[in-house]
Image (tube, helix red, strand yellow):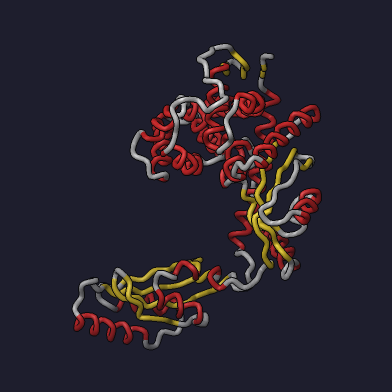
């Protein structure tokens, strides 16, 4: 998939924030100021990409990835950025064909999300872009393509992808066989190769990425701008990977890397990869905070400013309500008997997320299935909580987490095929 489509602009906004505070309005030393040329550098069906568009996108990529700006860098990046722009035009064109073109409101909402997430005021993202010489329309084009691709995936790709219970069982079996081995957290920058005659060009792009990493550019920022894999949106983070979990060529490279080190470009059937080892740890070591609990809670209302007498009476009533509770469903019955009481189910609650309430955090994980704890003081009043189920205590991910991981992998592959078909069906004319 195209990185320009899958990256999240919220992440870009966080990268922009420190730069915005010290941004210079003049071009960086040694860099040529962009000129408003309207020379066409590529045609994508009936849509033109101008030299000015390309120069602006190159500048945008440099500003948001922490690269050292120079005229030479801009020239060497132009080819790779142009390919990303071509993909974006194809995605927007296809969204029009399917009747799911992004609306102006959706684009403006995305700008607002960026500003809120980065702590910017209304309009400040556009102001920052202008302050570093980037026309806001350049960001609009990227955002439009991102929204368009998400809609295409939902309309055309998602219905073709499913995850069976058997696939989840197989994945769990492989994981159980790896208990005690070392897993590695890996980040990637991926440059796809769709045609055999594109391998050399992809290698040159990967070499340029490695060169910038050697100069100190942050791996995550470079991945967000230049990786063309689905992990671009998270700075290239592949997550925790077990031996045998990737292409054998990539597995061998990971095994030789030290933490915080990155690889030379690595060729697979899909394209070129640059990998970084983030960390290592034993696989499936018990992690108490990752245990998931299925709970039923009964809440008795009590204002936060209740007097000591009111609190004591409520505590006595709650303790009385706990008497005789033998299973989770009993709490629902009690809630119907007590005036003002409510009850509800909470499934998949992570133990670590209970830490804000010390009593719950310490007591609930220790209860057996069917056990009842409380009363616990919460903002709404007093809560009685029954534990109905537990999962994840062995350090293995839940079935839902495994299903989601498999689904994302399948969507990545299916989306890449769809994008390849769009390129093959299009008329693309790149000017020399």
Quarter of image, res 291: bottom right
Task: Give the mark count.
Answer: 0
Which residue ends up furthest to the front in the rendered image?
29
Where residue 157 sits: x, y (%)? 61, 39
Relative vertical location of residue 67 with respect to residue 51 in this rendering, above or below: below
Where residue 241 sits: x, y (%)? 69, 57
Q: Is residue 163 visible?
A: no
Q: Nearer the viewer, residue 99 or 30?
A: 30
Relative vertical location of residue 43 with respect to residue 183 in this rendering, above or below: above
Q: Nearer the viewer, residue 175 or 210?
A: 210
State left or right for residue 174 relative to residue 85: right
Relative vertical location of residue 132 with respect to residue 305 in this rendering, above or below: above
Q: Is residue 257 visible?
A: yes
Q: Nearer the viewer, residue 222 or 148?
A: 222
Relative vertical location of residue 234 with respect to residue 347 in this rendering, above or below: above
Quarter of image, res 75: top right
Could you tell me which quadrant the N terminus lies in? top right
State left or right for residue 268 relative to residue 39: right
Residue pictured at 49% horizontal, 68% vertical: 352
Q: Nearer the viewer, residue 294 or 214?
A: 214
Could you tell me which quadrant the C terminus lies in? top right
Residue pictured at 43% horizontal, 68% vertical: 345
Residue pictured at 35% horizontal, 77% vertical: 376
Where residue 332 sits: x, y (%)? 38, 75
Quarter of image, res 217: top right
């Amino acid at each position: 998939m195209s990185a320009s489509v899958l990256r999240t602009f919220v992440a870009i906004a966080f990268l922009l924030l420190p730069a915005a505070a010290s941004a210079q309005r003049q071009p960086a030393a040694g860099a040529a100021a962009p000129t408003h040329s309207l020379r066409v550098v590529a045609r994508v069906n009936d849509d033109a990409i101008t030299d000015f568009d390309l120069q602006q996108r190159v500048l945008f990529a440099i500003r948001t990835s922490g690269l050292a700006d120079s005229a030479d860098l801009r020239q060497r990046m132009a080819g790779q950025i142009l390919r990303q722009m071509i993909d974006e035009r194809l995605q927007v064109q296809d969204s029009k064909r399917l009747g799911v073109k992004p609306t102006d409101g959706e684009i403006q909402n995305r700008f607002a999300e960026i500003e809120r997430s980065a702590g910017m005021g209304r309009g400040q993202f556009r102001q920052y872009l202008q302050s570093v010489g980037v026309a806001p329309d350049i960001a609009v084009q990227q955002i439009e393509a991102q929204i368009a691709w998400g809609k295409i995936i939902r309309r055309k790709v998602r219905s073709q992808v499913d995850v069976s219970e058997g696939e989840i069982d197989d994945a769990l079996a492989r994981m159980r066989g790896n208990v005690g081995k070392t897993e590695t957290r890996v980040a990637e920058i991926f440059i796809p190769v769709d045609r055999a005659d594109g391998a050399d060009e992809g290698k040159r792009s990967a070499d340029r990425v490695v060169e910038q990493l050697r100069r100190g550019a942050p791996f995550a920022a470079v991945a967000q701008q230049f990786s063309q894999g689905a992990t671009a949106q998270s700075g290239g983070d592949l997550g925790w990977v077990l031996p045998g979990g990737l292409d054998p060529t990539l597995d061998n490279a990971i095994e030789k890397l030290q933490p915080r080190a990155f690889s030379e470009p690595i060729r697979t059937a899909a394209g070129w990869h640059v990998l970084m080892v983030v960390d290592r740890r034993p696989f499936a070591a018990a992690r108490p905070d990752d245990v998931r609990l299925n709970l039923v809670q009964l809440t008795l209302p009590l204002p936060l400013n209740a007097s000591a007498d009111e609190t004591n009476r409520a505590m006595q009533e709650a303790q009385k309500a706990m008497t005789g509770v033998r299973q989770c469903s009993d709490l629902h019955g009690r809630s119907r008997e007590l005036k003002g009481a409510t009850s509800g189910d909470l499934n998949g609650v992570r133990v670590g997320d209970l830490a804000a309430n010390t009593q719950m955090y310490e007591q609930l994980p220790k209860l057996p299935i069917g056990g009842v704890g409380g009363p616990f003081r919460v903002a709404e009043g007093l809560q009685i909580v029954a534990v109905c189920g537990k999962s994840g205590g062995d350090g293995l991910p839940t079935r839902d987490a495994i299903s989601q991981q498999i689904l994302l992998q399948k969507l990545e592959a299916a989306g890449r095929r769809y994008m390849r078909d769009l390129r093959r069906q299009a008329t693309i004319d790149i000017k020399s």
